Image (cartoon, helix red, strand yellow):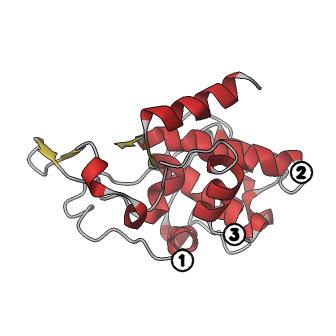
Amino acid sequence: IFSTASVAKTLTASAIMQLAEQGKVDLDAPLTTYLPYFEMADERYTEITVRHLLEHRSGMPDFDWLAPGYYDNPDNSDSALEELVRSLKTTELLSEPGESFSYTTMGFGLLGHVIEVVSGQSFENYIHDHIFAPLDMESTHQRLTDLDFTQMASPHIPGTDGSWIVNPVFPYAREEGPGSHFYTSVQDIAKYAIAHLRQ
């Protein structure tokens, strides 16, 4: 079983597009349409749309991956995605929404919470019910608690001194899930890829 890192963004994008096809999400609607408690210190946050987040053109910053202690206490609570949204009140944008490309995993955390609010399911349950289960991806999981650790390949994480450390399971927090992790086998990811290629 491998950690897929940012391939997870394609899951989130697929889920958003499913909801858009059902008329439940408008890609060009402001994010505040779905998350009215989303606020930032920069007043331009009201201009951020779902499409901006999908295209990495929201002006959002990213997680501070290399900050000392960043991986020490990952938040895997059920409310982690909502808490991420609510934590941005003092955060500034890097640029005008829609103006320039800036890759951000944090933006996909916000999209993950949109999926929760619109669908009424947790992000993980929505992805399981609408992507993993229909594709018979039985070896694929999003939460560490669901993994068979004896089958996990060992990823590496950056150490504080710039070196790389072998880590049995990459300690992603749940708020990062929509943009940076799910765990899968080669067989299952092949099913996922084939499903997209056939569309």
Q: Residue at 81% x, 52% y: name it.
A: 19
Q: Alpha carbon of mark 3 to alpha carbon of mark 1: how far?
A: 12 Å
Q: Alpha carbon of mark 1 to alpha carbon of mark 2: how far?
A: 26 Å
Q: Residue at 39% x, 67% y: name it.
A: 145
Q: Residue at 47% x, 48% y: name it.
A: 139
Q: Residue at 15% x, 46% y: name it.
A: 166
Packing grade of label 3 (10 A; few <14, some 14-19, many >=20) is some
Query: Which label sits on residue 22?
Result: 2
Q: Amino acid at mark 1?
A: Ser
Camera-side residue of 88 and 193: 193
Disc 3 marks which residue? 121
Q: Earlier in the sequence, mark 3 or mark 2?
A: 2
Camera-side residue of 127 and 150: 150
Q: Amino acid at mark 2?
A: Gln
Relative side of 12 to 179, left or right: right
Quarter of the picture holding the N terminus:
top left
Residue 135 seen anywhere in this rendered image of the structure? yes
Relative side of 140 to 128, left or right: left
Pinpoint residue 18: horizontal percent, then vertical percent: 79, 46
Camera-side residue of 199 and 161: 199
Does residue 58 lie above or below 24 as drawn?
above
Query: Which label sits on residue 79?
Result: 1
Relative side of 7 to 19, left or right: left
Camera-side residue of 82 and 8: 8
Does residue 123 lie above or below 27 as drawn?
below
Pinpoint residue 181: horizontal percent, then vertical percent: 44, 49
Residue 93 seen anywhere in this rendered image of the structure? no
Pinpoint residue 72: horizontal percent, then vertical percent: 23, 67
Q: Report helix, strand or loop for mark 3.
A: loop
| Viewer-nearest of discs 3 and 1 | 3
